[in-house]
Image (cartoon, grey):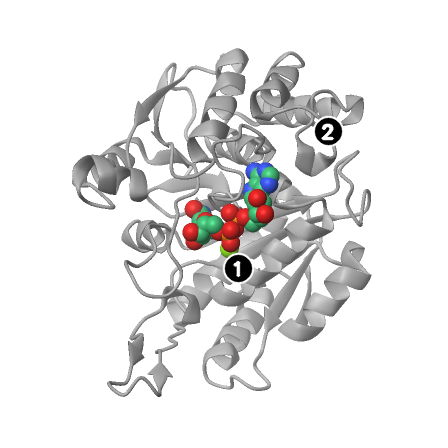
Amino acid sequence: MTQTNAAVRTITVIRGDGIGPEIMDAALYVLDAMNVGLQYEEADAGLAALEKHGELLPAATMDSIRRNRVALKSPLTTPVGEGFSSINVELRKRFDLYANVRPAKSFPNTKSRFPTGVDLITVRENTEGAYIGEGQMTSEDGMTATLTQKVTRKGSERIVRYAFDLARSTGRKKVTVVHKANILKSTSGLFLKVAREVAAQYPEIQCNEMIVDNTCMQLVMRPEQFDIIVTTNLFGDIISDLCAGLVGGLGLAPGANIGADAAIFEAVHGSAPDIAGKGVANPCALLLAVGQMLDHLGKPDDASRLRAAIIATLEAKDSLTPDLGGEGNTMSFAKAIASRI
Ligand code: NAI
Ligand code: MG
């Protein structure tokens, strides 16, 4: 779904929890400086919505995303263990945002293990598998916990196809199918079988298969061998944080949740309660997600302009946040980026 030619386009903006409002202010500051003809419709979700409206995902928020088809979202807090289920997962399910697309790229001056050589995209299935927590139950005596893990042919086929189409449209050469079919014969087995069928339809793109635990080791040792990774939901969740770690941390890792009728752009990281309210969160992850959103909106030149301004600011070490070893803050970093737009 790519839209073009709209003079003014409205997007839904969700400011989120924890560091969410701080990084959203910074991201919108830069977006405003770019003057790309977007206007914002604010909507609440998560803890902020619970406080204001008494519910985690108000109908008005669902309507806004349905209408605008594109949302920029800050992280939402999900308490660990008992309590309400994740609103992030709920949004992905309700809008059938089946593809979670997470690029990891080496940037200058990031204190990362790999200051050069990493340029890969994790394409994660976003609607099924163990991650969505279907059938979660603990026995009455509290001794046994279970969950249903379901993988479908439809879910596997559309995500693998998405990964190969992405390779085609972006000129990437290789897709690595990551699985655990040696042990999880039914679920991961079906995913791998379908992936092989789809791969055969893209003869010009190299395809290899890798078991998930080995993939983690390979990513740390030789990340340059990867181009596009496609995998199931839970593996993709873990692998994409690992990839973020390779290139300098979660402050630099963006993600897009794409479906046929809507798309939600966000940082990979969460609400970072440990630094919330201090004004020091790195706004780059959300800004790089803005870049993905501009691509999606049919504005690739603006997306490139934004990425170039981020890279130039990192190169100049101008007002970087503490996670990157700088002494700047969220807003000074954003202003330094905006001044290079
Ligand atoms: P987290 O990603 O919020 O934080 C992990 C570590 O990275 C912390 O030390 C944090 O300070 C640091 N960090 C994260 N973003 C940063 C940034 N922009 N700049 C500088 N440092 C940054 O993960 P955590 O603590 O496991 O989760 C906190 C909450 O966020 C949980 O409730 C979790 O469910 C939620 N979450 C929400 C997501 C979403 O809305 N898509 C994604 C991941 C987690
Ligand atoms: Mg995660």
Q: Is residue 232 visible?
A: no
Return the residue nearer the eye: 222 or 262: 222
User: 27 or 54, which lies in front?
Assistant: 54
Residue at 66% in and 74% down: 213
Mark 1 nearby-residue class (10 Å; few <14, some 14–19, many ≥20):
many
Residue shown at 57% from the left, 27% from the top: 300
Q: Residue at 49% across / 66% down in the picture?
A: 234
Left or right: 294 with respect to 252? left
- Cα–Cα gap, marks 1 and 2: 28 Å
Residue at 74% from the left image edge and 22% from the top image edge:
312
Question: Residue tagged by mark 2?
Answer: 326
Type of amino acid under label 2: Gly
Is residue 243 visible to the viewer in this orientation of the structure?
Answer: yes
> Which residue was labeled with disc 1?
237
Quarter the N terminus occupies: top left
Task: State the image coordinates of residue 257 (x, y, percent, origin top left).
Answer: 44, 47
**Amino acid type, callout 1:** Asp
Q: Ligand 2 closer than 8 Å to the CB at disc 1?
A: yes
- Residue 239 or residue 3, whichever sits in front: 239
Number of marks present in the image shown: 2
Query: What mark, if any, has residue 336 been given in the picture?
Result: none
Q: What element carries label 1?
A: helix
Would you place residue 333 above or below residue 158 in this image? Answer: above
Is residue 156 toward the left or the right of residue 181 in the image? Answer: left
Coordinates of residue 223 in the picture (x, y in percent): 77, 57
Residue 164 located left or right of residue 90: right
Q: Of marks 1 and 2, which one's residue comes earlier in the chain?
A: 1
The crowd level at tag 2 (other Cα within 10 Å; few <14, some 14-19, many 20+) is some
For residue 79, what is the image quadrant? bottom left
Above or below, 285 against 28 in this view is below
